Image (cartoon, rainbow, N blue to C red):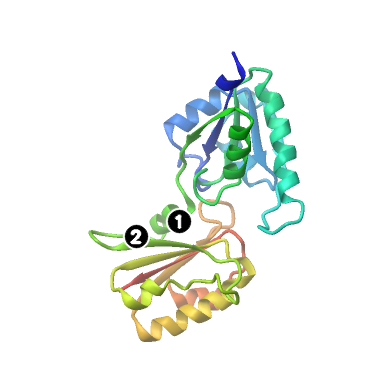
Amino acid sequence: MNNNEKCLYGIGLGPGDPELITLKAYHLLQECEVLFYPDGARALSILQGILSEEKLLQKKLMEVHISMVKDSINIESEYSGLVDIISAQLDTNKMTAYLTIGDPTIYSSFTPIQKLLHDRGYKTKIINGIPSFLAVAAACDQTLVYHSESLIINPVSDPTDNNFVLSEESSTSNNSTCIYMKQGKEIPSLLSKLSKEAKKNPLNIFGATNCCLEGEILYRSLEELQKEKPDNYFTTIISKNV
């Protein structure tokens, strides 16, 4: 096998429930000999729910650390170093995958890995997973969009900066659904802005923390969110125009 034929699979594990994984992802997990996964126990715990202990013992499991802060000083060197390790495994001709929670195409650490591998002449192949916001909608028994309605995804990192978007569409359109992901400590500011928006336009607001994972908490209204005051990175909030 030449260098151009070596391929890293980016496999989405879904939101956390071991049953919410595609058959394609399941079969590839069975076949792959080397599995890279982000540190923190979440991806590994999902994987342990999908594969048997016997099957896991047959694989080389490699935990990796990547900073989740976008402007981390060391993030470029972290990814470059990680790709050195991944490419070394690919050079052994072993079937290798990088695992992500949710889907590899949505705010995933797989994205920079994919680019760096392509720059080095390696191939990648994405195996989709169910993203967290779909699981949140289902858990709250809500649909997201219908007919001509718009779906807007907002990763909120800092509501005080100029990049913060409460979705201007929500104040000008009666047919939009806004998803807010990866907010963490900025959630109180987001809820304050949503509360002000709801006074001008009727909104159906719901969400979840750790959806499909241990410690799952569902919020079926803005009032529940304001009462619980979640500040977890794995909290997703969804706002729909009524």
Residue at 45% x, 42% y is 20
**Pointers 2 and 1 in contact (C-beta within 8 Å):** yes
Q: Does residue 55 sit above or below 73 in this rendering?
A: above
| Residue where numbered disc 2 is placed | 144
Q: Nearer the viewer, residue 119 or 91?
A: 119
Amino acid beneath label 1:
Phe
Residue at 55% x, 20% y is 5
Estimate the x, y position of residue 176 in percent, counting from the top left.
33, 67
Q: Quadrant of the N terminus?
A: top right
| Residue where numbered disc 1 is placed | 133
Count how many numbered circles sit on residues in the image.
2
Q: Quadrant of residue 144?
A: bottom left
Estimate the x, y position of residue 84 in percent, counting from the top left.
73, 32
Amino acid beneath label 2:
Leu
Q: Secondary structure at mark 2?
A: loop
Residue at 49% x, 71% y is 165
